[in-house]
Amino acid sequence: MQETIEPWYSVEEISRHLGVSKETIYRWLERHKIPAHRMGKLWKFKPSEVDRWVLAGGAESSERPTDHKGPN
């Protein structure tokens, strides 16, 4: 029986996988939130690690939008 090797995803591929923008991925990278591996100048992701992180609540944001202006 041959073992399947999980592919490495790029920023673009993981953003598509999660259904979020590349900017969101880069923001998570800046804040050291999303599980990622640096390979030279590139960030790579194992989909199973990212899926576990999402399911554990890692993608939840406690931040409030700074550009929202409520009624005065």
Image (cartoon, rainbow, N blue to C red):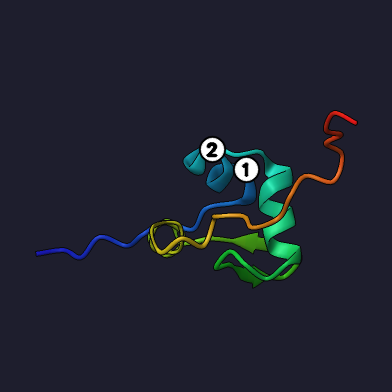
- Determine the residue positioned at 66% across, 62% down: 43
Measured as percent of width and height from the top left, residue 45 is found at 53, 60
Name the quarter where the C terminus is drawn: top right
| Residue that protrudes farthest toward the top in the picture | 71
In the image, taking residue 66 as reference, residue 2 lies left or right, namely left
In the image, taking residue 60 as reference, residue 51 lies left or right, namely left
Label 1: element kind:
helix
Measured as percent of width and height from the top left, residue 21 is found at 66, 38
Per the image, the residue denoted by label 1 is 12
Measured as percent of width and height from the top left, residue 20 is found at 59, 39
| Residue that protrudes farthest toward the left in the picture | 1
Measured as percent of width and height from the top left, residue 71 is found at 85, 28
Residue placed most toward the observer, 45 or 72:
72
| Residue that protrudes farthest toward the front in the picture | 72
- Determine the residue positioned at 64% across, 58% down: 62
Q: Are marks 2 and 1 in contact (CB under 8 Å)?
A: yes
- Determine the residue positioned at 84% across, 46% down: 66
Q: Quarter-wise, where is residue 1 in the image?
A: bottom left
Residue placed most toward the observer, 59 or 25:
59
| Residue that protrudes farthest toward the right in the picture | 72
Per the image, the residue denoted by label 2 is 16
In the image, taking residue 63 as reference, residue 71 lies left or right, namely right
Q: Quarter-wise, where is residue 67 in the image?
A: top right
Q: Residues within 10 Å of mark 1 (few under 14, many from 20)?
A: some
Q: CA distance from mark 2 to mark 1?
A: 6 Å
Please state which amino acid type lies under the numbered disc 1: Glu
Mark on residue 57?
Answer: none
Label 2: element kind:
helix
User: Could you tell me how many numbered marks the image carries?
Assistant: 2
Q: Quarter-wise, where is residue 55 in the image?
A: bottom left
Q: Residues within 10 Å of mark 2 (few under 14, many from 20)?
A: few
Please state which amino acid type lies under the numbered disc 2: Arg
